[in-house]
């Protein structure tokens, strides 16, 4: 068996753990070798605040625990041959929250890059960002750019972090780009859906196969509106910080039992 973690330098402890989990999964038949594989998993990581409040902790502790859950799922994705993981870290609407909370979220991202970048490189994880980074502090923008450029071309997992992201904003931005192209002389009648999709933040990503939402709500909250047209949805009451191996396995099990017809019969 060849696993994605075979490539590169001496494996870290974390990588050895992933490899072991992958081997166990293969033995138990959990590897997704069927056509119903998940190339792209997207996650709305909800419930951090409630997780913290339930424990009498400040909300930001829920987000901190949420970062740990991100690490867990990043490590598990190769087990299921998931090549793309897209997570909703900060929406265009989240700025309505108290500034202390949005600043804490940005600080957690900064800390995540500081602490995890070297490990992510060793694990072959490529970092990308979807969204408008311009309102973020310059130092954080530079740190993100460094993380992106240091991991470019890594192929075990493409981790796309939706940051100051909104699906409607993304669609508007794409429409504006198309309008400019029309002004430059292109004929809109010549355009296909693929041409439009090329103007989205996700232009080089496949569409998500599965969208997981934690925290009990049943809505898409302005996430990947164009891209999830035929994505399977799976929602759980579990708060994001409690989301782990068992919950991911369950989501994938349910996904694999679904029949995807993409509008056909
Ligand atoms: C929703 O939970 C969660 C968010 C708005 C932020 C999610 C962000 C993280 C888990 C951190 C991401 C960090 C990295 C490093 C990518 P909520 O606070 O709305 O939960 P609630 O509904 O219980 O209040």
Image (cartoon, rainbow, N blue to C red):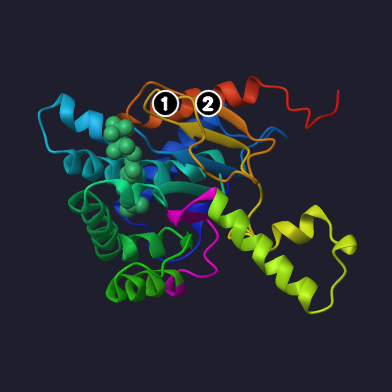
- The one nearer the camera, 180 or 159, is 180
- The one nearer the camera, 208 or 118, is 208
Q: Is residue 255 above or below residue 68?
A: above
Quarter of the image containing the C terminus? top right
Sequence-first tag of 1 and 2 = 2
Name which residue lies at 42% across and 52% down. Answer: 92
- Is residue 3 among what the camera can see? no
Residue lying at the far front of the rendered structure: 183
Quarter of the image containing the N terminus? top right
Q: Is residue 6 above or below residue 253?
A: below
- The one nearer the camera, 142 or 25, is 142
Label 2 CB less than 8 angstroms from ligand 1: no
Q: Is residue 244 above or below residue 177?
A: above
Query: Residue 164: x, y in percent?
Result: 41, 56
Q: Residues within 10 Å of mark 2 (few under 14, many from 20)?
A: some
Query: Residue 231: x, y in percent?
Result: 64, 35
Question: So how many labels did they put on this image?
Answer: 2
Give left or right: position of 226 versus 61: right
**Range of residues picked out in magenta:** 149-167
Query: Residue 97: x, y in percent?
Result: 27, 46
Instruction: Please tell me the numbered disc located at residue 234.
Output: 2
Quadrant field for ligand 1: top left
Question: Which residue in the protein does label 1 denote?
Answer: 247
**SS at badge 2:** strand
**SS at badge 1:** helix
Query: Residue 103: x, y in percent?
Result: 22, 57
């Amino acid at each position: 068996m060849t696993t994605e973690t075979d490539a590169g330098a001496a494996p870290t402890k974390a990588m050895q753990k992933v490899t072991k989990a992958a081997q166990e999964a293969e033995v138990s038949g959990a590897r997704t070798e069927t056509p119903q594989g998940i190339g792209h998993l997207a996650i709305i990581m909800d419930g951090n605040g409630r997780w913290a409040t339930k424990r009498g902790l400040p909300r930001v502790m829920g987000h901190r625990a949420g970062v740990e859950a991100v690490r867990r799922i990043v490590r598990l994705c190769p087990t299921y041959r998931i090549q793309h993981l897209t997570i909703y870290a900060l929406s265009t609407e989240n700025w309505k929250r108290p500034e202390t909370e949005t600043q804490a979220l940005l600080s957690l991202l900064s800390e995540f890059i500081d602490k995890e970048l070297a490990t992510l490189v060793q694990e072959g994880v490529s970092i990308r960002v979807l969204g408008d980074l311009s309102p973020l502090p310059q130092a954080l923008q530079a740190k993100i750019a460094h993380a992106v450029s240091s991991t470019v071309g890594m192929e075990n997992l493409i981790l796309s972090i939706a940051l100051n992201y909104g699906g409607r904003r993304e669609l508007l931005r794409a429409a504006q780009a198309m309008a400019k192209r029309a002004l430059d002389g292109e004929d809109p009648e010549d355009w296909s859906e693929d041409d439009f999709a090329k103007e989205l933040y996700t232009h080089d990503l496949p569409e998500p196969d599965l969208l997981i939402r934690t925290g009990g709500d049943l809505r898409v909250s302005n996430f990947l509106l164009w891209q999830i047209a035929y994505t399977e949805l799976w929602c759980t009451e579990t708060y994001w910080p409690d989301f782990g191996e068992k919950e991911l396995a369950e989501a994938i099990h349910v996904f694999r039992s679904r029949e995807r017809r993409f509008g056909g019969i």
